[in-house]
Structures are given as structure tokens and as C-alpha cells.
Amino acid sequence: MQKNIEKTAKDINNYKRKTIFYKSARQGFSEILKFLKDKYNEYTLLLPAYIGYSPNEGSGIYDPVIENDISHYFYSIDENINIDINDYKNKLLKIKGHAVVLIVHYFGYVDPKIKEIVKIARNNNAVIIEDCAHALYTDYIDRSCGDYSDVSIYSLHKMLPYKNGGMVRINNPEVIQLNETDNYYNILEYDLRKIAEKRKKNTILIEQELKDTEGIKILRETTFYKNQTPQTYPVLISKADKNKFYHELNAKGFGVVSLYHTMIKDLQREEYNIANNLGSKILNLPVHQDCNEVSLKEMCKEIKILLGEDNERK
Ligand SMILES: Cc1ncc(COP(=O)(O)O)c(C=O)c1O
């Protein structure tokens, strides 16, 4: 008699996606770039023209590219930090030989044209790396990203209360294989679903407080970004001095950041004015799981006061 159902699952590769831990996402990214260099000998990497650096942290995306001496081009992004599809396509078509594309889900949000972006890469036989450094929850809880690529990277210390931690998931083992490491982070100890819920709730609260406020441009309206969990909530301070906001809010105990305040040197050129301009205006407001409603409301009130002060001075 033919036996075709085992009592329990035995196929170790069924639904498995190999997942490797590193001290940081950039370490994992570096290993991917190295692997591809060994495999192809020569290849060209396409990167988004929105990459920052800071003297303390360097550049999480760009440092591995330079360290591994990878030849690369930048594709433009628009004033909403979405991919400029025409430029992306033109740059990809310019590549002779193997192409590798990096797609970054900035602040945990997915580009509205992601399907077209992926299709263009696939039509040109490019390897796709998804930078989910900010998108752990958008992938694992919302399932809105992570499946577009051959390999995806995650920054655990940005999304969970770790001092360090990064992760790489191999989505297509026919394209990428990496060795195991000794690192391990048990992310299942955290209730990722509840954390994602809390982050979304915090985002809605901030949006309600700040929408229709003169001088603030909301970059990621929640109604257009359903099923995506933010790392931070990005807004543009359009008419005032962003640096003043950054310093005064932090001095008052509101942990805002600026992703990114300064572009890497190679992007500090007129050609990339959009990115540099965004860098001078962007403020990323905290929405993480430790934020409480009262403090978030106070932060928004403080932002409005700062805007008011600025308007009065003009
Ligand atoms: C979009 C993006 N990708 C990758 C990284 C690298 O993350 P990690 O600090 O874990 O190396 C960062 C942060 O620097 C980032 O902002």
C-alpha cells in the first residue's frame, strides 16, 4: 500500500527561509556583497540616491559598498522619498554585465510602485536585495514586504530594545548562499504583533495631532500606507529651521531623529538636490513601542509651539 502522508512534517526545506544573524544589518549586507563578488567577479550595484551618514555611525548602507569596493550607480528618488522610476530604469539599462539592485523600505514603508520596480529589475535579470532595516514588522507582521527580493536585511537594534543585532534572510537560495554565524537573537520573545499594533496606533495619534498644521508636510499619510508598520514617522519641516526643532525637541526629552540629516559625500552634489533638500527638512518622530500617548501629544504640542514661534518671528 502506498504511504503518502507522514504523521508529522519531515521535509526540512519545506517553507524554510534560511535566516542568519549578525551584529548589525550592515555586517549582513557586507556578507551579501562579498558573496556576489565571489560569484560574479564583477557586478554593478544600483543604490537609491538617499543615503545619509553621521560621524558617529558612518553609513549603514554605503560603508559596506565602499569597504568591498563594489562598483555602483545611484538612482534618484523624488521629493516624497519614492523611487524615480524613469531614472531607476535608465540607470539599470546602462549596466553592462551583472546588475544588483538595492530597494530600501525607508522608515518601514513600501514604495507605492513596488510591483513595477521589481518587475523592471526582474526583466533585466537583476539580483534584488531588499533593505528591511526599518521594516521588520512590515514584513513579519504585515507581510507587505520581504517577498520581493532574493535576499532581505533587517536591523534588529533599530526595532527592538537591543544594543546590537542584524539579520539576513535568504529568499532565493538559488541566487544567494551565506555561511552561518555564532550570533543569535531570539526575536520571538517579543510580541511582534502587539508591538506593530502599538506603533501603528502611535502613528495615527501623531498624524491626527499634526495634520493640517501649517509648516508641516506629512510624508506618509496612514490611509495610503495601510498594513505597514513604521520605524519612525517622517515629516518635513517646510518653512522653519529643522535643526532648531531637532535640538529643542531633544533638549525637552522628545527623542526625534533625522533620517537623514546629511547625505554621504558622493550625494552632496547638485544632481542630488532633492535628497539634500529633504535631508535639511526631514524630522523622524518616535512611534516605538515604549512611547505613551500623553508624551506623544506633548511632543506634538511642542512642535506646534515651535512652528508658531517661528511664524511670529517672520
Ligand atoms: C535604511 C538602512 N539600512 C541599513 C542600515 C544599517 O543598519 P545597522 O545599523 O543595523 O547596520 C541602516 C542604519 O544605519 C539604515 O538606516
Image (cartoon, rainbow, N blue to C red):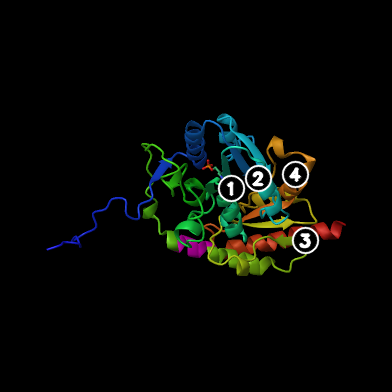
Discs 2/4, front: 2
Question: In the current view of this chain or complex, which residue is farthest to the right?
Answer: 314
Q: Which residues are magenta?
A: 194-199
Camera-nearest residue between 163 and 92:
92
Residue bearing mark 1 = 124
Would you call the spot at circle 3 few (<14 residues within 10 Å), some (14-19), or many (20 or more)?
Answer: some
Figure quadrant, ligand 1: top right
Residue type, mark 3 in image:
Gly
Amino acid type, mark 2: Leu
Give the CA distance from mark 2 to mark 4.
20 Å
**Residue at (64% x, 48% y) in the render:** 259
Residue corresponding to mark 4 = 272
Judged by depth in the image, the label closer to the viewer, 1 or 3, is 1
Foreground pick, 306 / 179: 179
Q: Residue at x 70, y 49 (%)?
A: 87
SS of the residue at dot 4?
helix
Neighbour tally class for label 2: few under 14, some 14-19, many 20 plus, Cα within 10 Å: few
Task: Report whether residue 110 is seen.
Answer: no
Task: Mark 1 or mark 4: name the one nearer the start of the chain.
Answer: 1
Identify which amino acid the numbered label 1 is placed on.
Asn
Instruction: Pinpoint residue 305: horizontal percent, then vertical percent.
Output: 74, 61
Q: CA distance from mark 4 to mark 3?
A: 24 Å
Of discs 1 and 4, which sits in the foreground? 1
